[in-house]
Image (spheres, rainbow, N blue to C red):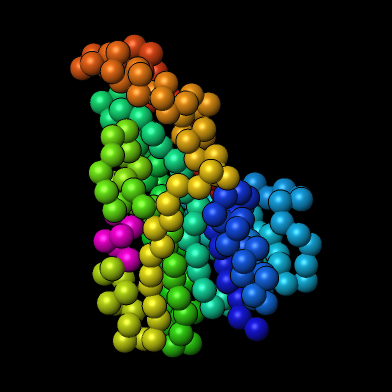
Amino acid sequence: MKTVLITGTSSGYGRATALHFHAQGWNVIATMRTPRAGVLPESDRLRVVELDVTKPASITAALEAAGPVDVLVNNAGVPSIGVFEGTPMAQVREVFETNTFGVMATSQAVLPQFRERGSGVVVNVTSSVVLGHMPLSAVYKASKMAIEGFTSSLALELAPFGVQAKTVEPGACLTTNFATTATNGTSLSGVQAEVAGHGSGMNGELGTRAGRRPMTMA
């Protein structure tokens, strides 16, 4: 029976992915930054493991707890919606720490066992935002586009060892709280209204909102 390790399974696509693999008969290692009861069903084929993809020690501990895995699904991510001019670089770095460097770090940690076995799959969840252009998504899109390029090159490096790397670009889903989390409860129409109202002077309230700390969807 094969085993999949999925990051960011406390809600949204991560939780749905964990439930899907479990329904297909897989052993599932469902990781969360802050594990809590009741998110996923109890099963001898499903284990919830603590994992913060921005912390190397947490990655090491999670993989040791998981044991051998056949598939890694990098789903944990930080949403970000806002005007780039009003977004502090500290927030930009925070988004990249999870969406980009976190994906690279977990991938790098699992690759030795894949290469030694001559099999394994890394699935990196990006976003349909990489397929087109839209305002208010500069930071988020950049963090996901980086993973698109990373995965394309990684796939070529891994192919000689029988290991695969792929991306999935999910679209908008009404059952996730992406927009609410990214804007701290402000509607997208409200953010757009502020953009129109402030014109090029995007400090003040707009800059304050853009500077709020994002939450990790993990």
Up-down relation of residue 32 to residue 89 (above or below): below
Up-down relation of residue 94 to residue 4 (above or below): above
Residue 135 position in % (x across, y down): 28, 34
Q: How many marks?
A: 0
Is residue 190 or residue 104 the one in the foreground? 190
Residue 179 position in % (x across, y down): 47, 36
Q: Is residue 60 visible?
A: yes
Image quadrant in which you'd find residue 62? bottom right
Who's the residue at 64% across and 75% down the image? 24
The quarter of the image holding the N terminus is bottom right
By secondary structure, the bulk of the magenta-drawn segment is best described as helix
Who's the residue at 28% across and 30% down the image? 84
Is 133 left or right of 176, judged from the image as shown? left
Image quadrant in which you'd find residue 104? bottom left
Residue 141 position in % (x across, y down): 31, 45
Who's the residue at 61% across and 76% down the image? 3
Does the magenta segment cover residue 171? Answer: no
Who's the residue at 55% across and 39% down the image? 177
Image quadrant in which you'd find residue 45? bottom right
Is 20 left or right of 183, judged from the image as shown? right
Up-down relation of residue 204 to residue 144 (above or below): above
Q: Is residue 63 visible?
A: no
Is residue 11 or residue 207 the one in the foreground? 11
Does the magenta segment cover residue 147? Answer: yes
Is residue 38 or residue 96 the one in the foreground? 38
Q: Which residues are magenta?
A: 146-151
